[in-house]
Image (cartoon, rainbow, N blue to C red):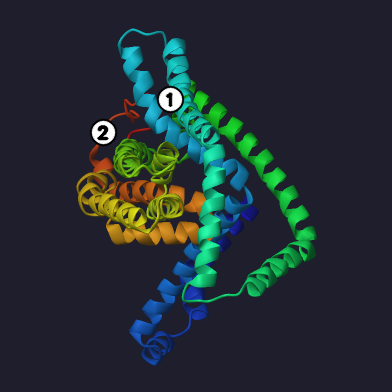
Amino acid sequence: MGQGRGRFVGRRRAIERAPEQRAAAQPPSGADDEVRAAVPYGMRLAAAWSWRLLLVGGVIAVAIFLIIQLRYIVIPMLVAVLISALLVPFSSLLQRHRWPKWLAITVSMLSALAVVGGLLTLGIWQIVRGSDELAAQSVVAWNEFRAWLTDGPLHFSEAQLNGFADQIVSAVQAESGVLVSGALSVGSTVGHFLAGTLLALFATLFILIDGRGIWAWVVRVFPRRARAAVDGAGLAGWVTLQNFVKVQILVATIDAVGIGLGAFLLQVPLAVPIAILVFLGSFIPIVGAVVTGALAVFVALVYNGFWPAVIMLAVVLLVQQVEGHVLQPLIMGTAVKVHPLGVVLAVAAGSFLAGIPGALFAVPIAAVLNVMVNFVAGGTWKQSAGPPVVPSSPLWRTVPQRPGYQRGE
């Protein structure tokens, strides 16, 4: 009994002495004042922001590094999400008209494959059908170009032209090893492309079948307090992505029809393949339009002459100006809610980091992130009450309610 009372008294005295010990261990308040006086407030604020920005930048750098390393998985998944943003509403529409789910999904997938395959088949068939005429015209164009080099203002001699040709042949022979390795890399790229295509198709199929379950799992990964914000931000980003895909298809169709019709009226060969390339290239903002437009002008120059090429250039510029000053501000700007300067910077950064795939996904990623960040920063999700119901889009389902889990907890 005495020992227990002694331990109690000792513990009480230790508790009473604890504030005095902590006060003795802390530096005098004058030292803090001297430090604060020596370091300006702006410097201390800048230092506080600096290490936080460095931490955030490091996390972003690691994320980008992982995405680049896993690009053969990430790119097909992003393609699947873009395709799903187009096919999910179509499949949902069919199901609302009492189509069985399996039939609606099958029709959606087959429709997408039929459209893409049909465009590629039509373009390849047009090229094969006119291959003989194209080969003959290529020889004529080369002879005219060679005559212009010798008889034109440059006045190259036949010996000089032959010397240039010999240099090209020698360079090709000297770099034969590089060509072989390049052919092997092309084979590897084709294999990666086929594997990525299969992965994108399977991912799209699974999103159409169980997209609700996938999203419910993603929401449950986050802490309970964050689920309401993730729920609403996901809905906002998904709606923006759907709008982007629909508007991009509309813009690409207008570009393809305008440039393809101009090439047809000018009787430029390969008018249909040019229109198909313009349609596909329009999904890569800025870069795709420039490359496909230049190709149309080049074909007109080679096979139709100088003035048809000038008219073709005028048609391309007119279509691109209508897209840039009418379609993009009125349609695309409303759909993605990103300033044109932001679009240019996003495409440039995406091209620098990941080439063509980066340019392709830069705008939708920037648009989705912009909407999601604005939604979370707005704080409207905190005002909701009750269990979190994930959006009614077919890609989402209601998150199972758990004890003590309320939206905005």
Is 302 on the left or on the right of 229, as rendered?
Answer: right
Is 123 situated above or below 347? Answer: above
Is 397 on the left or on the right of 214, as rendered?
Answer: left
Q: Earlier in the sequence, mark 1 or mark 2?
A: 1
Of badges 1 and 2, nearer the viewer stands 1
Residue 394 in picture, x, y percent from top left: 37, 24
Amino acid identity at mark 1: Arg
Residue indicated by mark 1: 212
Q: Is residue 152 visible?
A: yes
Q: What residue is at 60 percent from the left and 30 percent from the top?
A: 198
Q: Residue furthest front?
A: 151
Residue situated in front as seen by the camera: 193 or 156? 156
How far apart are the alpha carbons under marks 1 and 2? 22 Å
Is 144 situated above or below 322? Answer: below
Q: Quadrant of the C terminus?
A: top left
* Callout 1: SS: helix
Is 351 situated above or below 111? Answer: below
Residue 139 in picture, x, y percent from top left: 57, 51
Q: Is residue 404 visible?
A: no
Residue situated in front as seen by the camera: 399 or 179? 179
Q: Residues within 10 Å of mark 1 (few under 14, many from 20)?
A: many
Residue situated in front as seen by the camera: 154 or 172? 154
Q: Residues within 10 Å of mark 2 (few under 14, many from 20)?
A: few
Whether the residues at callouts 1 and 2 have beta carbons within 8 Å, the answer is no
* Callout 2: SS: loop
Q: What residue is at 23 percent from the left and 47 percent from the top?
A: 327
Per the rendering, the mark at residue 385 is 2
Question: Within the image, what quadrant is residue 310 found in?
Answer: bottom left
